[in-house]
Image (spheres, rainbow, N blue to C red):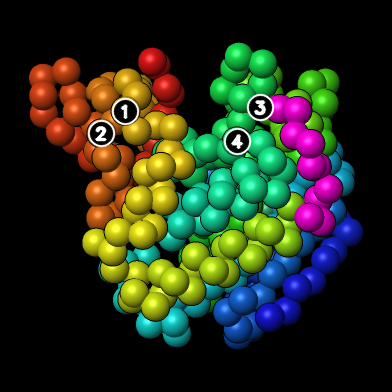
Amino acid sequence: NSVDVVVETGSTNSDLADLATKGVPQGAVLIAEEQTHGKGRLDRTWSAPARSGIFVSALLRPSDAGVPRDNWSWIPLLVGVAASTALSRAAETPVRLKWPNDLLVTVGEEERKLGGILTELADNGRAVIAGVGVNVSLRENELPVPTAGSLALAGAPVTDREILLRELLRTLSELYEEWCADGGDPTATRLREAYLSQCATIGKHVRVLLPGDTQVVGEAVDVDDLGRLVLREPSGAEHAVSAGDVIHVR
Ligand code: BTN
């Protein structure tokens, strides 16, 4: 595997997508100390002060690893499980997920966003770029938005970026290899159980803001084979959502 560290770049996801087009193999990893045009989900930006966090992207080629395209929809959730598992362990602080893959920590009494994951297709749909951003050392006045958190604000005893990053990459490659060995089968229970146990959304009453300004409310009861969040609406009807912003109501 090749691991490259750059001091400053626009976006590690965009850089790795360019490399993917040039045929760089699965397993390549790009780490930046600072991003000037970090990208988030749903066309948002991702900003954080230099050296305040983890900005990393990894290149996956699931077809080469024997996973048919129909099974790729669990990849964003897989990367989320890897990140929450690795950070909980290495930072010695509970990190959970908000569907699909926001990383959450508790700061005081509040559940705050610690980081997030952006997965994108590259190389004409042959590759997946898995980008992870984590707020590590940010103090309250450095947060991009007041609802954000950081490991330091959560009181984590370990905030060494290198230790966290090593554990993150190790856990991601372990989970990914296991998943590939199953052909990415969404009915295989290991990944699904790990996801459900890490996901704070399951069992909560949520409001989901869907792309295009509509919203649904209900109890989050499960995640389906496509990685969609299954909601039980007040009428009792079940409804699966594939993208959107979840707000935990209670
Ligand atoms: C989100 O929560 O919206 C996802 C944020 C993903 C940020 C990471 S930082 C490394 C990688 N490069 C990017 O441009 N974005 C991801």
Looking at the rendered image, the disc whose residue lies closer to the viewer, 4 or 3, is 4
- The part of the image, by quadrant, that contains residue 168 is bottom right
Q: What residue type is labelled 4?
A: Pro
Query: Where does label 2 land, which residue?
Result: 221
Question: Residue 122 location in percent, x, y?
Answer: 52, 70
Q: How crowded is mark 1: few (under 14 residues within 10 Å), some or many (20 or more)?
A: some
Question: Residue 97 location in percent, x, y?
Answer: 49, 39
Q: Compare marks 3 and 1 and give the one earlier in the sequence.
A: 3
Q: Magenta region's main secondary structure? A: loop
Q: Compare marks 2 and 4 and give the one earlier in the sequence.
A: 4
Nearest the eye: 109 or 14: 109
Query: Where does label 1 land, which residue?
Result: 203
Q: Compare marks 4 and 1 and give the one earlier in the sequence.
A: 4
Instruction: Give the residue displayed 19% in from the left and 35% down from the top.
Output: 239
Q: What stretch is highlighted in magenta?
A: 154-163
Q: What element carries label 1?
A: loop
